[in-house]
Image (cartoon, rainbow, N blue to C red):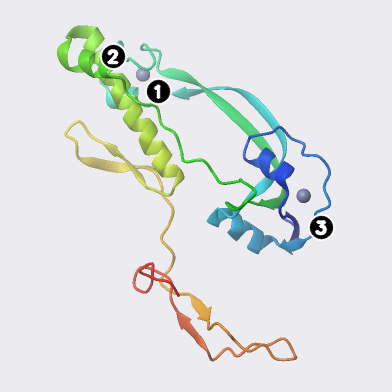
Amino acid sequence: MPDRVKVHSGCKDQAAVSLRRAEPPAPKCRCKRMMDWDEANAMVNEGFAKWVVTGRTRGVEEVPCRLCARMDAQERKTCGNCAGVGVVSEPRIWDTYNNDIVLITDGDLGFKEKTPRVPTIEAEHIGYAVLETGIKAKQAQDRIMEYANLIQLELHKYGATIYLTGKDGKRQEVYLEGKKAPPNKAVGHAPGTIKFKDGSTNKSWYWELEGEDNDWGRAV
Ligand SMILES: [Zn+2]
Ligand SMILES: [Zn+2]
């Protein structure tokens, strides 16, 4: 990791690439601003920026069927998600990055991130799942379970911890670790902190405000 990285700001082309609305490489631009890597990384984690994408490939990846994990051998043969094969092909996009970032704003540039979309279940499927019997019912039930899984994965993108659920409906081990809550401490400098000629600030004015004990979401 470099110490300093380039920051694209107000850079529509670069933002469009990172939001997957255009293909890399983005046209040349005049952005020159630099920033410490740590700060850039924090901005990406907070959702204000994205890493600059330099290349993109598309393909499919064979992944283990998520439904089968909860089935016994007999049930697995008729799994509605993978038809008993145990693996499913999922479309994948692989982006490659350099260490630069592009700022994403929701202002007049129209870069606002879209709310996530999750497939819906049609009335027909619910009908099959409840009213039919045999394989047809089971496959409809499997499909509904798979939708439930997709919703969970979508929530995970926003930081939720996802647990496996047993047949009894009880929570089991962690399947996907979520985002950690901030540690119980942070130093905030008062607005209007004095900056002296030598560059130092008045460090006696601060308060600790982060973490679940201190931060209840109020404006500071
Ligand atoms: Zn730029
Ligand atoms: Zn399966």
Q: Quarter of the picture for ligand 2? A: top left
Looking at the picture, how far across and down is residue 106, in whole percent?
A: 57, 51
Q: Residue at x 48, y 75 (%)?
A: 186
Q: Amino acid at mark 2?
A: Gln
Looking at the picture, how far across and down is residue 215, in whole percent?
A: 38, 71
Q: Amino acid at mark 3?
A: Lys
Q: Which residue is mark 3?
A: 32
User: Mark 1 and mark 3: span between their CA atoms?
Assistant: 46 Å
Which of discs 3 and 2 lies nearer the camera? The answer is 3
Label located before the other in sequence (3 or 2) = 3
Quarter containing the N terminus: bottom right
Which of discs 2 and 1 lies nearer the camera? The answer is 2
Mark 3 element type: loop
User: Mark 2 and mark 1: span between their CA atoms?
Assistant: 14 Å
Q: Which residue is mark 2?
A: 139
Label located before the other in sequence (2 or 1) = 1
User: Mark 3 and mark 2: span between their CA atoms?
Assistant: 55 Å
Q: Is residue 46 visible?
A: yes
Mark 1 element type: loop
The answer to whether 57 is drawn above or below residue 152 in the figure is above
Q: Which residue is mark 1?
A: 65
Q: Residue at x 24, y 8 (%)?
A: 135
